[in-house]
Amino acid sequence: MKKSELFPSLSEHSPIILISACLVGVPCRYDGQSSLLSPSVSFDLLNRTRLILVCPEHLGGLPTPRPRNEIQGGTGVDVLEGRSRVMNENGEDVTAQFCRGAEIVLKIAKSLGINVAVLK
């Protein structure tokens, strides 16, 4: 069966969306699970868009499973501008891995002309 038969409304003109891989069932969250979107949303995205799956944490060099991570004393913007850090639950600084993953995802989006992203 051809892809066009499975997803008849999908074409090379369908919008491209960059999406966190865990949201479509890839078990790449910190705990080795996924954060699957509802089946109706997933089906709608698959039927109407071309999806580019990314896991910024993996792209930045972090494994799955991994300790929980949290921004300390700021926002994602603060991390990117060097005013805050990302620390894991073991007290290790993983800021560099998160920034590297964000940079790679941004390069992917720019290289493909993507202007819509759904990230966890």
Image: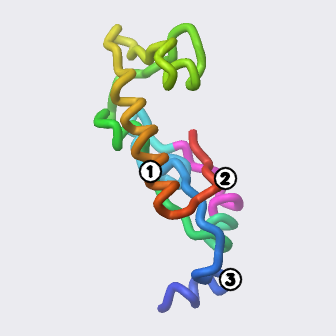
Residue type beneath disc 1: Lys
Above-or-below relation of 109 to 43: above
Residue that label 3 marks = 9
Label 2 sits on a secondary structure element that is loop
The range drawn in magenta is 35-42
- Around disc 1, counting alpha carbons within 10 Å, would you say few (fewer than 14), some (14 to 19), or many (20 or more)? few
Residue at point 59%, 19% (across, down): 75
Name the residue that disc number 1 marks. 107
Whichever of labels 3 and 1 marks the residue nearer the N terminus, that label is: 3
Q: Of the residues shown, which amino acid type is indicated by label 3?
A: Ser
Reply yes or no: does residue 106 show up in magenta.
no
Kindly report which numbered mark, 2 or 1, lies closer to the viewer in this rendering.
1
Work out whether residue 5 or residue 20 is closer to the camera in this orientation and state it.
Answer: 20
What x and y, as percent, mark residue 18? 55, 55
> Between tags 3 and 1, which lies in front?
1
Mark 2: few/some/many CA within 10 Å (<14, 14-19, 20+): few
Check the picture and name the quadrant holding the C terminus. Answer: top right
Residue 87 relative to residue 76: left or right:
left
For the residues labelled 2 and 1, the Cα–Cα distance comes to 28 Å
Q: Is 41 in the magenta?
A: yes
* Mark closest to the chain's N terminus, 2 or 3: 3
* Residue 9 place in picture, x, y as percent: 68, 83
Question: Which numbered dot is residue 38?
Answer: 2
Picture quarter containing residue 62?
A: top left
61 in relation to 86, above or below: below
Q: Is residue 79 above or below residue 118?
A: above
